[in-house]
Amino acid sequence: MTATSTKTSPPEPRRRRKNNPESVRADILAVATREFSEKGLSGARIDEIAEQTRASKRMIYYYFSDKETLYLHTLEAAYQKVRLQEAELDLDHLPPLEALSRLVRFTFCHHAKNPDFIRLVMIENIHHGRFLAQSKLIQSLNAGVIDALTNVYLRGVEEGCFREGLDPRELHWLISALSFFNVSNQHTFSRIFDWQQAAPENQRKLEEHVTDMVLRYVRPDEVTPQP
């Protein structure tokens, strides 16, 4: 009787978990954005953020030192996201009216799709912009959007489709204000006036109205013919 020998494969080496610092940081910031936007700086807790991420509380402190630093980085990430997307609009290669229309529509839709961003901005206003003022990154990012809008505006004035005398910062304020209110006051406005503001068809109408209002604002005043 011959015994049949069975060959056993050697055990596979254990796969070591590879820590990707950028991925870990992004995960922490995504959860922190939600926590800070819902509970504010004082209400958010590092313990709760750690429970919802792949990182430990100790690791969060390793990357961000303390809760206020994490909050500041969360603000920076939120502003960086919107400004990077604005930079991809390719406004310099579009006619001025089309470029401005694209920027307005982008701003309106971005804010509508990112209510966490709006709430973070509202929370930072409660703190009188104290943390935002500490960030050179945010200041440089926001200067960039004004530069881009200035270029569009000056091209429009040169081509005669925009009126002279407007301040690009005030134009940016107008675009932001109309788009911001759509999110910040959505629930109260809907309840007060019994109107489903968030309904897709109403959002499409509002996007059209906001775009039309801004474009009418920048166009040259029409000269009424004398009788």
Image (cartoon, rainbow, N blue to C red):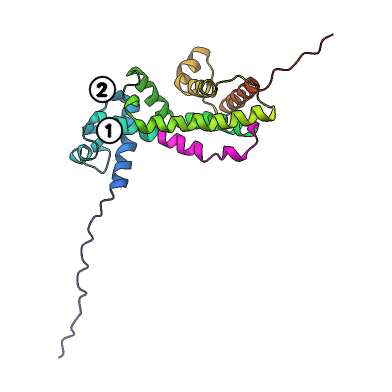
Tell which tag, 2 or 1, sits nearer the viewer. Answer: 1
Q: Position of residue 39 (x, y in %)?
A: 31, 24
- What element does badge 2 sit on? helix
Closer-to-camera residue (226/108): 226
The magenta-colored residue range is 79-97
Q: Does the magenta stretch include residue 102?
A: no
Left or right? Give the position of 225 relative to 19.
right
The three-letter code of the residue at mark 1 reads Leu
Which residue is identified by label 2? 42
- Quadrant occupied by the C terminus: top right
Q: Position of residue 7 (x, y in %)?
A: 20, 79
Residue at the spot x=31%, y=23% of the render?
40
Task: Answer yes or no: is residue 131 visible.
Answer: yes
Which residue is identified by label 1? 70
Residue at the spot x=34%, y=18% of the render?
128
* Residue extending furthest toward the right: 227
